[in-house]
Amino acid sequence: MARKITYQQAVNEALDQEMARDPSVIVMGEDVVGGQGSPGEMDAWGGVLGVTKGLYAKHGDRIMDTPITESGYIGAAVGAATCGMRPVAELMFIDFMGVCLDQIFNQAGKFKYMFGGKAETPVVIRAMYGAGFRAAAQHSQCLYSVFTHFPGIKVVLPSTPYDVKGLLIQSIRDNDPVMFLEHKMLYTLEGEVPEEPYTIPFGEANLVREGGDVTIVGFGRMVHLAAEVADKLAKEGISCDVIDPRTTSPLDEETILESIENTGRLVVVDESNPRCSMASDIAELAATKAFSSLKAAIQTVTAPHVPTPFAASLEDAYIPSVDQIEAAVRKVLK
């Protein structure tokens, strides 16, 4: 049996093992060392939440603190990737994408297409996302649907420590740009993770729960809420498929459609805002490719179309809840 480590430790271990395996892997970002060059590891915090703590002591200057200039160091990471390196750049919060978006979608995401398939850009951009941390409107958004929209970029949303390690190693070894997005509220989640390196292929969803009555598709942290609802309803004889796509680009459409064809009912749980979201994307997929199998109208459970509130009570109301997911499942069963 594999030992248990946290989601946060799984990120750190994947980076550590890949840096030890491949000298072309470098890590850069704001405060990823935390006191670079200062005496003693206690001064090197490893980022605002300590995710990269200890890596500087092992790998030295291949872990680089950068100035607060996302456009500069994300651009540098993209450039390094085109020149034979495998950079992992940390965009501290996904909300900061606005100041470096051109470097990601207009440059890294298009090089392979612009140069006839000859250019490779093996860059990974890690970022925290998600509400619940009392971090207010500029540090709490779920923007994975934005990156999913852009062709040429792979988008990864691990929900467990096991998936974190396997998907991050896969991301670092991949030859295309990857947005690797970590929900900050999952960092303390523990799970079984093998000590040895392993990979999880992109585009292969995980069937978290299996049942024949309702299909629930969830993303990131929402997978755990959906599983909680499925476990509760199972006591009443209601069985649910709970699907974690793991990656939104590429998306495992086959697994989702097969489940819908079996259950005839779909609930999509997506923490992002509702307009042009993954919830609307999965609903469109079901409506166009599995319409004849549907026995009820598709239900989506999302955050409202407003910025993330700072007040604790309002933020709790903003995030999709177990009660909302359960209500949606019961609605499609009527």
Image: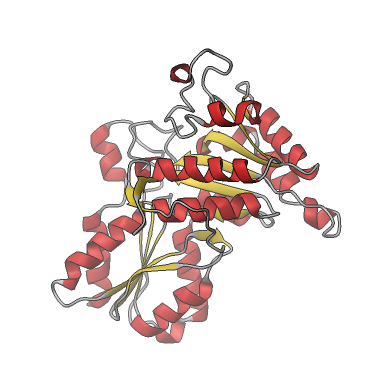
Residue 156: x and y in percent read 53, 54
Picture quadrant of residue 210: bottom left
Residue 57: x and y in percent read 54, 26
Q: Residue at x 58, y 16 (%)?
A: 37
Q: Residue at x 45, y 73 (%)?
A: 256
Residue 261: x and y in percent read 41, 83
Residue 58: x and y in percent read 56, 30
Nearer to the camera, 330 or 128: 128
Nearer to the camera, 133 or 138: 133
Picture quadrant of residue 126: top right
Classify residue 109 as left or right of residue 221: right
Compared with residue 167, is residue 44 higher up or lower down, i.e. above or below?
A: above
Classify residue 189 as left or right of residue 254: left
Q: Residue at x 77, y 38 (%)?
A: 79
What colouring method underlies this structural image? secondary structure
Compared with residue 196, is residue 203 higher up or lower down, i.e. above or below?
A: below
Compared with residue 207, is residue 49 higher up or lower down, i.e. above or below?
A: above
Of all residues, the one furthest to the top in this rendering is 39
Observer able to see residue 156: no
Of all residues, the one furthest to the left in this rendering is 236
Q: Residue at x 47, y 67 (%)?
A: 205
Of all residues, the one furthest to the bottom in this rendering is 292
Observer able to see residue 189: yes
Classify residue 54 as left or right of residue 61: left
Q: How many marks?
A: 0
